[in-house]
Amino acid sequence: MTFKPDAVAAKQTAADWREAIRLVGGLYEREGIATSEYAEAMINGVTEFGPYMVLMPGLAMPHAKSAAGVKRAGTAVVTLSTPVEFGSPANDPVDVLVSFAAGDKKGHMEMIKSLANVLSDGDLIDRVRAAETDEELAAIFTDLSDD
């Protein structure tokens, strides 16, 4: 299994789920993956369709339609020091966001498949949650890639 995010941010602070998604969007902007339009598209997705991107207890996979401000395909992982509520009775509160930005529909499906492997690994998610620094968080995925 190989998954190496383009950007990570550990133990961030967000007042609510919108701010948590904007943290992800900020990483995409910094890395040249997407414009701020993509963060707003992810937020609009939750507003319009509900907390569908909260996939399991404590974990959300923010994403949006590929055309919304994406410059190139990319992924990001953000952990929160204090979990936020997305409105998912079964899976709130969320403290791990594993996000992707896909350039097209095919890429969208490929990214979901590759992330499904990562998300099904409970030990990995526990390690992600425990990482205190960006370096520790990035190292978890570097170790995966070396396997």
Image (cartoon, helix red, strand yellow):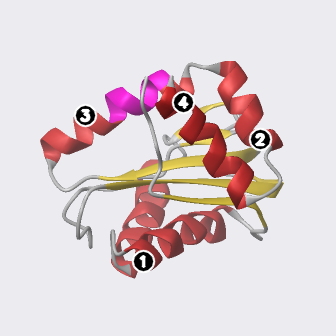
Q: Amino acid at mark 4?
A: Leu
Q: Position of residue 27 (x, y in %)?
A: 51, 70
Q: Residue at x 76, y 56 (%)?
A: 80
Q: Position of residue 104 (x, y in %)?
A: 15, 51
Q: From the viewer's perspective, tell me whether residue 74 is left or right of residue 47.
A: left
The local secondary structure at tag 4 comes to helix
Q: Between tags 1 and 4, which lies in front? A: 4
Q: Which residue is mark 1?
A: 29
Q: From the viewer's perspective, tell me whether residue 145 is left or right of residue 74.
A: right
Q: Which residue is mark 4?
A: 144
Specify start and end residues of the magenta stretch as a single range. Answer: 112-117
Q: Residue at x 73, y 49 (%)?
A: 136
The residue closer to the viewer here, 89 or 36, is 36
Tell which circle, 3 or 2, labels the residue nearer the N-terminal end: 3
- Between marks 1 and 4, how big is the CA–CA gap? 25 Å
Q: Which residue is mark 3?
A: 110
Q: Which residue is mark 2?
A: 129
